Image (spheres, helix red, strand yellow):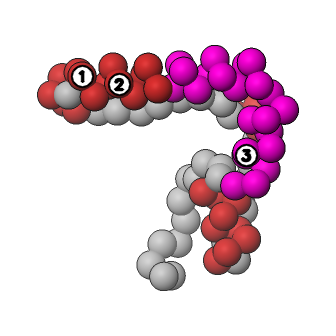
Amino acid sequence: NGQVDAWAGLDPHMAAAQIDDGARLLYRNVDFNTWGFLNARQDFIAAHPDTLAHVLKAYEKARLWIAAHPDEAAKIVAED
């Protein structure tokens, strides 16, 4: 809604902002991409270890499925 002057974004959010809202990409260096970081505060991790374990298991399940089904995964990502 026009209240943010700049932000660091990750796809698909950055791509959606460019397409849907006319956001302008100022700088991109694909060498900086990590292709797989999850971030959480230490206090959240300490307070919610079961949630952390659940999320990590879900990501691992997805990673294994994507590795076994790369064409289908690409189709899903392309559609979204």
Q: CA distance from mark 2 to mark 1?
A: 6 Å
Q: Position of residue 75 (x, y in %)?
A: 80, 44
Q: Position of residue 21 (x, y in %)?
A: 64, 77
Quadrant (top left/top right/bottom left/bottom right) for the C terminus: bottom right
Q: Amino acid at mark 1?
A: Asp
Disc on res. 54: 2
Q: Is residue 60 magenta?
A: yes
Disc on res. 38: none
Q: Amino acid at mark 3?
A: Val
Q: Amino acid at mark 2?
A: His
For residue 70, above or below residue 17 = above
Quarter of the figure with residue 72: top right
In the picture as drawn, the residue positioned furthest to the left comes out as 47
Q: CA distance from mark 1 to mark 3?
A: 28 Å
Q: CA distance from mark 3 to mark 2?
A: 23 Å
Q: Nearer the viewer, residue 78 or 14?
A: 78
Quarter of the figure with residue 34: top right
Q: Tell me if label 3 and label 2 are in contact, CB under 8 Å.
A: no
- Mark sitting earlier along the chain (1/3): 1
Q: Position of residue 78 (x, y in %)?
A: 79, 50
For residue 43, above or below residue 10 = above
Question: Which residue is labeled 3 in the image?
Answer: 77
Q: Is residue 45 visible?
A: no
- Mark sitting earlier along the chain (3/2): 2
The stretch of residues the image draws in magenta is: 59-80
Looking at the image, which residue is at 64% across and 58% down? 14
Q: Tell me if label 2 and label 1 are in contact, CB under 8 Å.
A: yes
Q: Secondary structure at mark 1?
A: helix
Q: Give the side of residue 50 with respect to residue 10, left or right.
A: left
Question: Which residue is labeled 1 in the image?
Answer: 50
Q: Residues within 10 Å of mark 3 (few under 14, many from 20)?
A: few
